[in-house]
Image: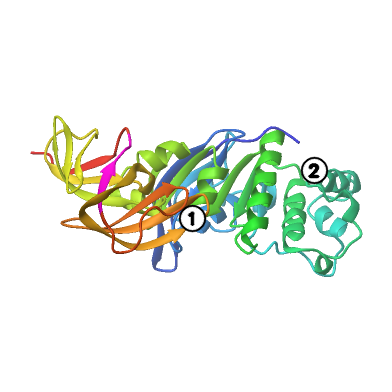
Amino acid sequence: MPAGLGITVEGLAAAYGSAAVLHGVSLSVEPGEILALLGPSGCGKTTLLRCIAGLEAPTAGRILIGERDVTAGRGVPPEKRRVGMVFQDGALFPHKSVAGNVGYGVPRGDGRRQRSTASLDLVGLGDMAARMPGTLSGGEQQRVALARALAPEPGVILLDEPFSSLDAGLRWQLRSDVRRMLTGIGVTTILVTHDQDEALTFGDRVAVMRAGTIEQVGAPPDIYARPASPWVAAFVGEANLLDASFGADGADTAIGVIPTSASAGTGRVLCRPEQLRLATSGSATVGAVSYFGRDTRYEIDVPEAGTLIVRSPGPPEHEPGDAVTVRFIGAFAQGWPTDPH
C-alpha cells in the first residue's frame, strides 16, 4: 500500500442549487493521519467528504490531495484522485461475488486478482472471496466495502458513517479493527460521523462541524476537556453549563467556586458529569437515577442552576428525593466569558 497523501482544504464553499451548504471551510489532514469529522445531521460533513472525493463540485476554494490541486480547471475526476470511499450502506453489487466486488475498481491487467486477494486478506475475509454479498453479515459486508476501497491502493480513504447501521457490539469491534488496520498501513483517513464516542475513539484528531463551518479541530482530549464554545461542549458529550462570575480564585457558580482559565467578567463554565460528586444532605434534590453497571447517572435539581447531570463510579448511593450537595472534583473547568469587563 503506497504512503498516505495529505489533504488541504482552503476556503471551500459548496451549494445545492441556491442552498449554501459549506461556507469557506479550511482544513488540513497530515499524511497517514486519521481525522474524525464530527457534526449533527445537515451540517455539511458528507458534502465536504464528497467534494474531496470529486463526487460534488465546490463553488469556491480549492482542495489539494498531496501536492495536486484536484479542483483546478474542470477538476480531477474521482477515479484519478487516488481516493477510496466507503459509504454508509456499503453499496456492494449484489450480483457480483465478494472477489468481483473488491476487484471492480482495479484496472484489468493490473494484478487485479492479486490485489483483490491481498485486500480481502487485509480485512480478514480471504476465505470468503467466492461468497455473494447477500450471504454475509452486516459487519462482513462493510469489510468487503473497505477492501474494495483499498484494492486500487489509494492514498486517501473516506469513510461516510460506515458503522452506523450495525448493532452496538459489532459497531464497537469493527471500528476498532478498522482503525488498527488503517493505522498499520498508513493510509490517510477521514471518517464522517455524528457519534461523539466514535469520533473520540477513532480519530487521531477531531474536526467539529456546525452549519457548514468548522467550529474546532484538535486532539480528542482537547475537544472534550477544552471545547472552543458552549455549543461544542454540549455537542461532544454530556455537559453541565453553569452561569458564572469569573475572578482570580476561579468561577463563582451555584455549586461553589470552580477553577477555570477565565479570570474576569461573567459567562458560563463547563462541568462534565464525571467532574461532579454528591454529598449527603444539602439544598439540591436527586431526581432520576440510572445505573449503567460501570457507573450511575443522576439528574440533580439544583437551586439557581436547574438540572445537573452527575456520573459516579459504581452502584447508586442516592435515591430519588434525597437531599444532596453537588461538589466539583475536577482539576479544571473550561469557561467562556460573555462580558470580560
Check if residue 266 falls in the magenta segment.
no
Residue denoted by label 1 = 45
x then y, percent, for residue 332: 30, 34
Left or right for 102, reference 59 = right
Name which residue lies at 39% across and 52% down: 317
Q: Is residue 225 visible?
A: yes
In the image, residue 249 above or below residue 89: above
x then y, percent, for residue 124: 81, 47
Q: Which residues are magenta?
A: 324-330
- Tag 1 secondary structure: helix
Name which residue lies at 47% across and 39% down: 220
Near-viewer residue (189 or 235): 235
- Distance, label 2 to label 1, CA atoms, is 28 Å
Name which residue lies at 70% across and 45% down: 177
Q: Which quarter of the picture shows residue 339?
A: top left
- Tag 2 secondary structure: helix
Q: Which mark is residue 122?
A: 2
Q: Quadrant of the N terminus?
A: top right
In the image, residue 216 above or below residue 322: above
Q: Quadrant of the C terminus?
A: top left
Left or right for 197, reference 97 = left
Left or right for 257, reference 132 = left
Amino acid type at circle 1 is Lys
x then y, percent, for residue 153: 75, 42
Q: Farthest left residue?
A: 341
Please tell me whether mark 2 or mark 1 is closer to you in this view.
2
| Count of numbered circles on the image | 2
Q: Which mark is residue 114?
A: none
- Label 2 Cα crowd, 10 Å radius (few <14 / some 14-19 / many 20+): some
